[in-house]
Image: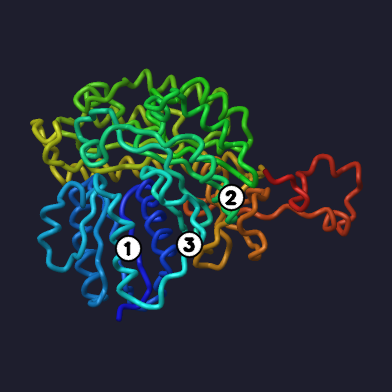
Amino acid sequence: MRPRTYRVVTLGCKLNQFDSASIEGLLRARGFREAKGEDPAGVYVVNTCTVTENADREARRLARRARRENPGCRLLVTGCSAELDREGLSRDPGIDEVVGHSDRERIPAILDRIAAESDPAPQREIACIEEAEEPAAAGPLHYGDRTRAFLKVQEGCDLSCAYCIIPRVRGASRSIVPDLLERAALALTARGYREIVLTGVNTGDYGKDLTPRTTLAALLQRLLRTPGLGRLRLNSLEPRTVTPEVVDLLAGEAGLARHLQIPLQSGCDATLKRMYRNYRTTDYLRTLERLRARVPDIGLGADVIVGFPGESAAEFEETYRFIAASPLNYVHVFSYSDRPGTPASRLPGSVSAPEIRDRSALLRALGDEIGLAFRRGFVGRVLEVLPFVRRRPDGRLRALSGNFIEVALDGDASLVQRLIPVRVDRVDAGDTDASLLPTAEELEQMRIPVEARGSMPEPHRGLAIH
């Protein structure tokens, strides 16, 4: 008899993390518990990514390892690679079920069948979102001991970027209705999650397919009213979807994290044109400058693809100079990976692997440099941070600020899952060290004159937590 345990391994983006949380919730609702340590899993799920060829290889490697280490398990492979290469994965005798995005509604029935194979009968848990509500909402959610929860608001993409296979595997853009998202957010905060990260393939497209039509800004206004919410965070927005209304909310709503990832992909207009991107560098820079002017402390990140077909040394240099002169604070560098079936796969001018590695290293070093400069600007200042459940290897707490600065600080478990103010004490290439602010009682013990206290930050106990 298989143990009533599960293990879920997730590759890829935050959207995949949401999908995995949905599958975990479905398993727990059927009486399964997460396998711990080296314990065998009765159900093993590999949630795959296909954004690069390496991601496809990693998915197959993980599936083989899952079968080897859990010989009696039911092995389910899902996600983007399962959608793209359903037939190839289905021929693997070690895989029991292959479920792509287009037939994801089969997952509850598959899990029901697996649960029926073992005793005792599963005891259903309370679901965050009931399975019967709407397939796009993806059922109950479980994030284990994670500090933050991800909430999918939108699926699919209507863009036609030359390098991207994702529209083919996730389909056209479609939004989840606001009422369902409000209920999901309320359920997550009721379970203690203080930060909710909104995610989607093209989140900025939210609402244009709904009747009545709505917008991402309107959804943000609704979700920001969720009782118990500490912080709402946007994950990534395409440049043209950073609307004035979204900028106004980032500037004016304390509960909306001042952080935004805006895919750049290239800082060279010629490369952007070959990529079929719907903006140019002047448009992108204008968006960044508007955000920086309205929200001075915002953390701004960008995704960049290195080695796109035809990218010459001069074009790469344009990208490097553009980023160096921009208001960006973070850079996520991706090596171009040829995906068969995309327009880019037919373009001439491939860049050699060694050249891609060298260029990527240069951009990552630049990213480290601008990130360090951004963090150094907060030394001596107060940031509101959310301490994580999982600590650093040195035992200190890890905590994340609204503008995406991760700090290390001393503290006990009582601080976890609370928004607390800390002072940034020291910044170096590897760490941002912070300390808790003194409490009112500690100020009294320090015998600081009352008239001098006005210049000190507010104590962390008694802080009004959103």
Q: From the viewer's perspective, is residue 455 above or below residue 160?
A: below
Is residue 300 in sight in this rendering? no
Residue behind mark 2: 189
C-alpha distance separating marks 2 and 1: 27 Å
Residue 144 — which label?
A: 3
Q: First in sequence: mark 2 or mark 3?
A: 3
Q: Position of residue 290 (x, y in %)?
A: 50, 21
Name the residue at the bottom extreme: 1
Q: Compare residues 1 and 214 and report the one nearer the observer.
A: 1
Is there CB contact under 8 Å for labels 3 and 1?
A: no
Q: First in sequence: mark 2 or mark 1?
A: 1
Q: First in sequence: mark 3 or mark 1?
A: 1
Q: Residue at x 43, y 59 (%)?
A: 25
C-alpha distance separating marks 2 and 3: 14 Å
Q: Secondary structure at mark 1?
A: helix
Where the N terminus falls, by quadrant?
Answer: bottom left
Q: What's the residue type where badge 3 is placed? A: Gly
Residue behind mark 1: 111
Is there CB contact under 8 Å for labels 2 and 1?
A: no
Q: What's the residue type where badge 1 is placed? A: Leu
Image-based side of 93 in relation to 457, left or right:
left
Graded by Cα atoms within 10 Å as few (under 14), some (14 to 19) or many (20 or more), the crowding at tag 2 reads some
Q: Compare residues 353 and 235 and report the one nearer the observer.
A: 235
Q: What's the residue type where badge 2 is placed? A: Thr
Is residue 153 in sight in this rendering? yes
Q: Secondary structure at mark 3?
A: loop
Q: Position of residue 243 (x, y in %)?
A: 47, 22
Q: Position of residue 113 (x, y in %)?
A: 29, 66
Q: Compare residues 366 and 124 and report the one nearer the observer.
A: 124
C-alpha distance separating marks 3 and 1: 19 Å
Q: Residue at x 34, y 69 (%)?
A: 115
